[in-house]
Amino acid sequence: MRGFKFTLAAALVCAGAASADIVAPADVVFTDGVAVAASLTGAAGNPAEGAKIVGSKKLGNCVACHAVSALADIPFHGEVGPMLDGVGDRWTEAELRGILVNSKNMFEGTVMPAYYKVDGFNRPGNAYTGKPAEGPLDPLLSAQQIEDVIAFLASLKE
Amino acid sequence: MKMKAATAALIALMAAPAMVAAGADDDTLIINEEITMTTKAPAPAHLSDALDEVMSGWHFRSDGTQAMQMDDFDNPGMIGVEAGLEAWNTAEGSEGKSCASCHGDAESMAGIKAVYPKYNAEAGEVRTLQMQMNACRTERMGAEAWKYDKGDAINMEALLASVSRGMPVNVAIDGPAAATWEMGKELYYTRTGQLDLSCASCHEQNYGNMIRADHLSQGQINGFPVYRLKNTKLNGVHSRFKGCVRDTRAATYKPGSAEFVALELYVASRGNGLSVEGPSVRN
């Protein structure tokens, strides 16, 4: 019993150490109020995964509002936001990270959701059930997913 | 490989003009070759800061969906109207009365839908049409109230809308209705949920734009109840509001709640000048 408890405690410490590199939503540091210089995971993301997240209705669903020529095989791109072709030329990675974490810093009053923000919402729900959220919110995308999306966006050059 | 890229580029090119042209169309809505609907009107004065013109959701639907609303034989919502007419003439409750016992023909209700929600002085509240129907049922017929936005209530609302078709929406927003209207306006512009969007984010700032596969309209309610091809039934205003609020990842309000009553009055007033169109057909 004692031994088991000890192992459990050690395992928890290890998990803590592994996630210590991940910047929590509350700890994200903005430079000039709009950009986030450091990777949220401490590492570069995977652009292929990022492409999936941008196109997937269940994940980022960015194409609900943005058209992306690189994802032309996915049907129905929206036109609420600007086309994302060439965003890798228009913005630095730090700026793209800032836009994803909380777009309202870069674009005041924008309709684009903040993907790495967990508080300050009015009547937050439990995902799309229409019921009130239970407990703390998860960000819309994880740190890893944000980095993957940034890697994909950075590759969108004219 | 090269070929594929070229095809993708071509598809993108072809998709672009279609998207640009995707605003409201210029078609005319005439029902049964008889009633010409006002589906575009100058924005009412209270809205003139935000919009120049108000438009029925009909203009944002495909030709096929539009056509279904142009003839009562093709409009599946008319089945609800028929059921409503049967209920109109059926005595219910402890008083042994039907709607017809007090009001006569359903046609005598022409013009009523156009002015609801409306302030009721005796009750001291703004009432939706469904609240008024239920007041008649419980107070005059001795019958049970119908559940908000459920089949019986929606069918009756569809009947009352149908006899007002073509008449201009004209809800009062001043006097005793003003406080409720202000509350509704506040709700319309308040962002909700983790997506942090208000009604205005989609239906004022972005109508005419595609949001994924959906063509955003102004979110007008002159066409309610609405037969939706998606769920193959007539839908009430509050149920639609609930769905839209849910889609912002928010905790919704309930159909029949004070919040949705206020929001209904406000959204109805954004369509003052458009024809009553219900039951309409949407996707």
Image: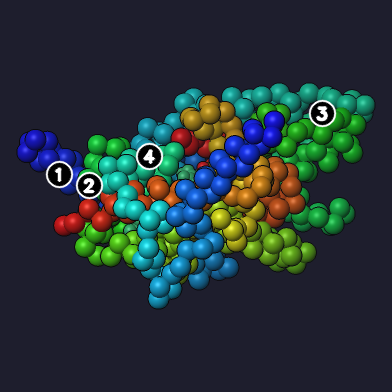
Is residue B47 left or right of A144 when viewed as pictured?
right
Marks 2/3: CA–CA distance? 61 Å
Task: Report crowding for label 4: few under 14, some 14 to 19, many 20 or more residues within 10 A (C-alpha).
Answer: some
Say which residue appears at 69% left-offset and 34% top-offset: A2
What element does badge 4 sit on?
A: loop
Separation of disc 3 and disc 4 at Cα? 53 Å
Q: Residue furthest bottom?
A: A32
Q: Are marks 2 and 1 in contact (CB under 8 Å)?
A: yes
Q: Where does label 3 land, which residue? A: B98
Q: Are marks 2 and 1 on the same chain?
A: no
Residue to which mark 2 is pinned: A69
Q: Quadrant of the N terminus of chain B?
A: top left
Q: Please say if B109 is above or below B183.
A: above
> Callout 3, which amino acid?
Ser
- Left or right of residue B11: residue B167: right
Residue positioned 47% across, 26% down in the render: B74
Q: How many marks?
A: 4
Chain of the residue that carries numbered disc 2 in the rendered image: A
Label 2: element kind: helix
Depicted B234 relative to depicted A96: above or below: above
Tell me the tag on residue A56. 4
